[in-house]
Image: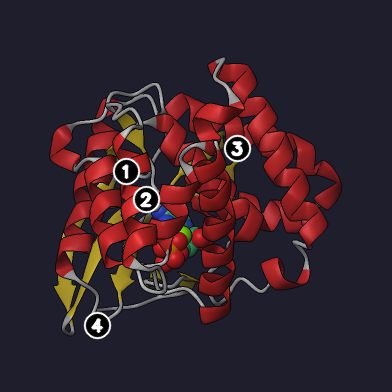
Amino acid sequence: MEHNRQIGVGRTAEVWEHGEETIVKLYLEDFPPEAVGQEFKVSTYVYNQGSVRTPRPVELIEAEGRRGIVFQQIHGRSLLSLISGQPWRLSGYARQLASLHYELHQLEGSPALGRYKEQLRRQIVAAPILSMEEKTAILEHLQQLPEGSRLCHGDFHPDNVLIDAEGAWIIDWMNGICGNPAADAARSVLLFSMGTMPPGSPLVKRVVTSFIRQKLTKVYIREYLRLSGGSYAGINAWIVPVAAARLTEGIPAAEKEQLAKEIRRRLRSLRKA
Ligand SMILES: Nc1ncnc2c1ncn2[C@@H]1O[C@H](COP(=O)(O)OP(=O)(O)OP(=O)(O)O)[C@@H](O)[C@H]1O
Ligand SMILES: [Mg+2]
């Protein structure tokens, strides 16, 4: 396969220029094929809805033992790189992020994409670090949360939004799923406030200081709630299950310990309530 310029690299894939106005997202060799299939399925679903700007998924390919998805090429920069270049514009970018997220939440999801609560349940059961008692308490809490049937991105953060001359594009739908938007917003809040970003984006370590993280989180939440008319409690209730599920991801050990500590702190106050 002819490769041209490499455009990006993340935790799961490399992105290369490929053909006329297209790119290929080439997954790491041992990456689960179901996850590639899920990204193609969700991207196609979202593209076909027509109201959320996302690169057109062209085809699934296999080359040199690796799977890839060919997408329309976007000539733009990620919101993360814009934030790191112009941190004084952070509030505006955070509001834009919230409004893009709110807009995509207006789309109905499809159960064929999978169900968020069901996926969270599976991941919580499989989570490392937590005890059986802790998992049981989290699962009981999850049980009481409303299912929802909207489109959720599943990994909505500023590196998955590209901005070009005409506006914003939402990419990276591998975790896209049908569920409650409040769960999706809680996941973003968690990523903004304590996430680490993929290797190759040193800007988070260097530039997105804890001040920037806190400010992004605060402005995002305020704007998201203003648009949705929802309550902070509605989002906050999802933090524990979403954080527990995140323990199954390939994130640094230190971040897992930090998540477990926060989960335990919140479980204690849930018990008191
Ligand atoms: N359609 C596209 N056009 C132009 N550039 C793209 C396109 N899709 C992805 N990129 C570039 O490649 C980078 C990585 O893409 P993507 O977010 O889909 O994968 P990933 O980062 O490996 O996934 P993860 O967020 O799970 O680590 C993006 O930040 C962007 O710079
Ligand atoms: Mg990404």
Which residue carries the number 1 mark? Answer: 140
- Kind of residue indicated by mark 1: Glu
For the N terminus, give its image quadrant.
bottom left
Q: Nearer the viewer, residue 38 or 267?
A: 267
**Mark 2 or 3: the one toward you:** 2
Task: Give the residue at x 55% y 73%.
Answer: 257
Q: Mark 3 and mark 1 in contact (Cβ < 8 Å)?
A: no
Which residue carries the number 2 mark? Answer: 137
Which residue carries the number 4 mark? Answer: 29
Q: Mark 3 and mark 2 in contact (Cβ < 8 Å)?
A: no
Q: Is residue 137 visible?
A: yes
Q: Earlier in the sequence, mark 2 or mark 3?
A: 3
Up-down relation of residue 76 to residue 48 (above or below): below
Q: Earlier in the sequence, mark 1 or mark 4?
A: 4
Q: Mark 2 and mark 1 in contact (Cβ < 8 Å)?
A: yes
x and y, in percent, of residue 119 in the image: 25, 50
Mark 1 and mark 3: Cα distance apart in space: 31 Å
Up-down relation of residue 230 to residue 195 (above or below): above
